Image: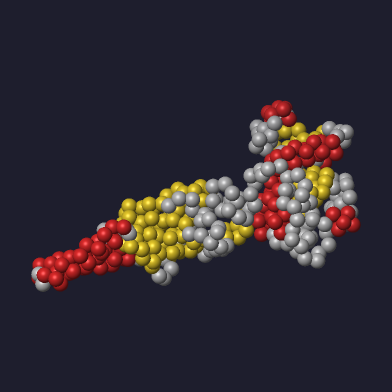
Amino acid sequence: MKNWFQALQRGVKYRVTRGGFLFILAVTLIGAAAVASANNLLFLVVATMLSVFLVSGLVSRLGLAGLELDFALPEHISAGPTVAATLAVRNVKLWMPSFSVNVSGLADEAGATAPPILTSAVYFPIIPGRATLEETVELRFSRRGAHRQNSFSFSTRFPFGFLEKTAAVSLRRDVVVYPSLEPKPGFEQLLNDINGDLEAHYRGRGHEFYRIRAYEPLESARYVDWKATAHTGDLQVREFAREQERAVEIYLDCDIAPGAEPWFEEAIDCCAFLVWRLFQQGAGIRFQTQEFQIRVPEESNVYTILKYLALVCPLRGKAPEPPIDEQSFQIVFSSDPSGIEAAGWTPARLLRPGDSGLGVDS
C-alpha cells in the first residue's frame, strides 16, 4: 500500500510529571533559602536548575518536531477483531534525531466514548534524522463505516522526564471498515437453520452433470476429475447443475420503522455474517436493497457487498423492490413485514426486530 505520511498538527500539550513536581518543589525551596540567606551560591544553583528546566522543554519540543506518521493497512478490514498493520514513523529533520518517542491512539472522531483504534502504545527509543522506522502493530476498529480521520499522538519525556509533551497527528484519508463478520449470539443457530432450509428448498432438483472446470481453493477433492486433470496438467473438477441452482437471494430493507435504528445496525451485522459464511460454503448470492443489487460471484466478489454494507444508511419513504428470482431461496431483513409482503417476498424467510439472532427489539 502506498504511504501518505501526515505531519504533526500545531499545538503541543504539556503535562508536568511527578519528577517535574519534585524538581519544581526543590527549585522553590532553594530559591526561598537563597532569598532568606542572600547567598549568591544558592542563587547560582537556582539559576542553573531553571536553565536545565527550560533546556529540557526546548530539547523535547525539538524532538517532536519533524515527525510524520502513516499506517500500511490490510486491504480488507472488518469491525471488531484486531488486524495487523505496519506503523511507520519518519523523522524529516536533516540531522537531529528524536529520542524516547511514544505513539498512541486518541479517541475516534465519532465521539469521546469511541475507543482508539491503536490497541497499545508503540515506543521508539531513537529515530535518526532522515530515517523511517516501522513496527508491526494491532489495530481494532469498533464500528463499520468510512473512518476519514484517525487520531494519534506523539509523546516524549526526553531528556529529564520533568515534562511530558504530547502532539496530535491525524491520518486524513478514508479507511472503509466492513461490518463485523464475527458471530453474535444467535447468528450461528440462524445460519444452521438457514442451511437446513436451503437443503430442503433445493432437494430433488437432480445432480445432472454441468461442466468440467478448474479447481478452486478449499473445494472437496471428491469432485476432482482425474482424467481431465491428467489431460490438462491442472486440477479439474466436475460441476453439477445443482451447484448452479443453489443460490440465496438476500434483501435488506433500508426503509426502517421509526426507532428501529439499533435493530438496523444489528441487521447489517447479521446480513454481513450470512453473506460471508454462505459465500464460503459455496452458495451463489443475489443481494438487493432499494438502491443496490448485485450477484456474487457472477458480477463481482463478496467484498463488493461488504463494502456496501459498511457504508449503507437508512432510507426513508422508499418501498421495497420485488425479488429478482421468485424460485430462489430468499432471506429478508425488514422492520415492516406488510411492505415486504406487498413487494412479493411472501415465501421469504423474514428477519425482523425481536427475532432470534436479531435481538434488538424496536
- Could you tell me which residue is drawn at 72 percent across and 33 percent down? 237
From the viewer's perspective, tell me whether residue 222 is left or right of residue 57. Answer: right
- Could you tell me which residue is drawn at 81 percent across and 39 percent down? 198
Q: Position of residue 32 (x, y in %)?
A: 18, 69
The vertical placement of 223 against 106, above or below, is above
From the viewer's perspective, tell me whether residue 344 is left or right of residue 55. Answer: right
- Could you tell me which residue is drawn at 49 percent across and 61 percent down? 151
Q: Position of residue 203 (x, y in %)?
A: 85, 34
Q: Where, quadrant-wise, is the C terminus in this rendering?
A: bottom right
Q: Position of residue 75 (x, y in %)?
A: 57, 52
Indicate how the structure is coloured in the image. Answer: secondary structure
Instruction: Tell me the quarter of the picture where residue 24 sits.
Output: bottom left
Residue 43 visible in the shown view: no
Viewer-side residue, 324 vs 210? 324
Residue 194 visible in the shown view: yes
Viewer-side residue, 285 vs 124? 124
- Could you tell me which residue is drawn at 65 percent across and 46 percent down? 181
